[in-house]
Image (cartoon, coloured by chain):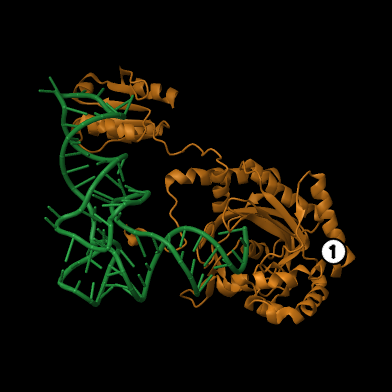
Chain colours: A orange, B green
RNA sequence: GUGGUUGUAGCUCAGUUGGUUAGAGCGUCUGGUUGUGGCCCAGAAGGUCGGGGGUUCGAGUCCCCUCAUCCACCCCA
């Protein structure tokens, strides 16, 4: 196997046979999201580096060590988007959302993160995401989650687990952070290196640590919710209520923090077993996102789902693969140059009337051409040789029954139109 | 970034304690009497054994380096 034909680490070619499954995910997304009033927004795959630094938070793992950053010829620092929200919010700046008018958008496309590839984790991966921008209400958070569940249902994905938590308002952070710092400080010498640096940089993430030596201190850590304002607590309560009213099952996971700094209040994650270590198929929450040169945050609630992971779950659940939209049902066999000339022209006429066709261009034997027809799974073949040309007919053969008949080119076209 | 795993034909893999022209199955191509596929039969093509260096009379087999794969840590979608 030649390594030269392999794409760079963590990237993959998606061949036509697999693309059908991607189409299905995307059309499920369009269908469901449009039911909730969401329209598609397409933003660039790269942005000014500052958009992500400022938007996601300088101290996040993603910004610190996973971004594909480069300088363009104009000396601008640009970054391949590691997630979708920051770019969408950048696009929303200076629109009516800044005055509390709601915008509902979804997106899908490639994201880039310089991580070591593993099961369900690539350097270029694809997300479908949704953002409800401009307004804040617990009902919107709940509806966003409900829509995600609806989408998963549409994708025939069952057995997923919804976990939610609250991070409180930004104003609640300080007391909670202080309490956490105070609590962890006596234990910190026995904790892992990452946690040591998190203590000052980002205490919250200690709660998320999975290292053996950190589990004990974490287990008894104070519940941050206790430091939140009544307003924040009520907000979360209301989100939970609305979800229950919608009949959505979930568990409250006080340890659920998530890695990006822009989250406030509601955060959530959906996991699915049977995916390997990366078991999150979607995640999101409410955010207040600050962008360069803007002191007023863009607010909203949203989520992103990993397309590769959704596909993996579908496969694990044995969701039947969609029909290949690239089937070519008609194959034109020609015997001799004159017949080939005719077929090249006739093929185009068939295509213009909506019939997918492949015409053989090589001077191969009848048998060889029949074998090809069989291999590409043609439903019908049209055979043309000198005698057919003389009589102005084509032999039309049904590949599954083996029946064949002589038809004029015009009749053959109408016949095939009726069959395909 | 840190670990471990694997790397032989288009694909899935065999290759015995290092020993002559590197194998199988599937796939592909060509044939099995004039222009008819799938099944069957016959034959053919196709590999500098991921790359580089080393040990050896001799390396696909052993050692080192490198690249890539897959997986785990980490992080998250």
Q: Residue B16 sits in which quadrant? A: bottom left
| Residue pictured at 31% horizontal, 59% vertical | A2
Label 1: chain?
Answer: A
Closer to the camera, A393 or A246? A246
Q: Residue A305 sits in which quadrant? A: bottom right
Q: Residue A228 location in percent, x, y? A: 85, 68
| Residue pictured at 69% horizontal, 47% vertical | A149
Q: Residue furthest right?
A: A230
Which quadrant is home to the C terminus of chain A? top left
Closer to the camera, A213 or A163? A213
Q: Residue A302 location in percent, x, y? A: 69, 57
Q: Does A148 appear above or below A113?
A: above
Tally of numbered discs? 1
Q: Does B74 appear above or below A158?
A: below
Which quadrant is home to the N terminus of chain A? bottom left
Q: Locate residue A86 relative to residue B45 in the image: left or right.
A: right
Q: Residue B18 sits in which quadrant? A: bottom left
Decide if residue A116 is in sight here: yes
| Residue pictured at 77% horizontal, 52% vertical | A142
Q: Locate residue A79 relative to residue A341 in the image: left or right.
A: right
Give SS at disc 1: helix
Q: Does A228 appear above or below A1?
A: below
Decide if residue A339 is in sight here: no
Q: Residue B13 location in percent, x, y? A: 35, 51
Instruction: Read off the residue under disc 1.
Output: A232
Task: For label 1, count other residues whose C-alpha is less than 10 Å away and answer few (under 14), some (14-19) or many (20+).
Answer: many
Closer to the camera, A406 or A56? A56
Q: Residue A116 location in percent, x, y? A: 51, 66
| Residue pictured at 75% horizontal, 51% vertical | A250
């Amino acid at each position: 196997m030649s390594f030269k034909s392999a794409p760079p680490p963590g990237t993959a070619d998606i061949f036509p046979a697999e693309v059908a499954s991607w189409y299905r995910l995307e059309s499920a997304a369009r269908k469901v999201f449009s039911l909730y009033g969401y329209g598609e927004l397409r933003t660039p795959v790269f942005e000014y580096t500052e958009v992500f630094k400022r938007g996601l938070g300088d101290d996040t793992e993603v910004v610190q060590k996973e971004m594909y950053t480069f300088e363009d010829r104009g000396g601008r620092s640009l970054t391949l988007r590691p997630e979708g929200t920051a770019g969408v919010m950048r696009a929303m700046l200076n629109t009516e959302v800044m005055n509390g008018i709601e915008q509902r958008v979804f997106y899908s496309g490639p994201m880039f993160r310089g991580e070591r590839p593993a099961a369900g984790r690539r350097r270029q991966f694809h997300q479908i995401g949704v953002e409800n921008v401009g307004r804040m209400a617990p009902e919107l958070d709940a509806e966003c989650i409900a829509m995600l569940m609806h989408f998963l249902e549409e994708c025939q994905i069952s057995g997923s687990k919804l976990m939610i938590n609250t991070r409180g308002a930004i104003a609640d952070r300080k007391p909670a952070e202080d309490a956490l710092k105070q609590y962890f400080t006596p234990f910190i010498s026995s904790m892992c290196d990452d946690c040591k640096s998190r203590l000052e940089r980002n205490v919250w993430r200690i709660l998320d640590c999975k290292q053996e030596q950190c589990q004990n201190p974490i287990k008894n850590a104070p519940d941050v919710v206790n430091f939140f304002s009544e307003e924040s607590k009520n907000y979360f309560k209301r989100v939970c209520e609305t979800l229950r009213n919608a009949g959505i099952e979930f568990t409250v996971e006080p340890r659920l923090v998530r890695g990006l700094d822009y989250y406030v209040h509601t955060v959530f994650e959906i996991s699915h077993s049977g995916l390997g270590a990366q078991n999150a198929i979607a995640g999101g929450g409410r955010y207040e996102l600050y962008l360069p040169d803007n002191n007023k945050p863009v607010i909203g609630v949203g989520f992103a789902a990993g397309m590769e992971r959704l596909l993996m779950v579908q496969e694990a659940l044995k969701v039947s693969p969609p029909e290949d939209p690239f089937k070519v049902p008609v194959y034109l066999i020609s015997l001799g140059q004159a017949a080939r000339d005719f077929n090249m022209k006739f093929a185009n006429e068939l295509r213009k009337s909506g019939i997918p066709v492949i015409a053989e261009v090589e001077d191969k034997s009848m048998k060889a051409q029949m074998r090809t027809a069989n291999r590409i799974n043609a439903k019908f073949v049209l055979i043309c040789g000198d005698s057919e040309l003389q009589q102005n007919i084509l032999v039309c053969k049904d590949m599954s029954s083996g029946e064949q008949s002589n038809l004029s080119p015009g009749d053959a076209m109408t016949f095939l139109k009726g069959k395909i």
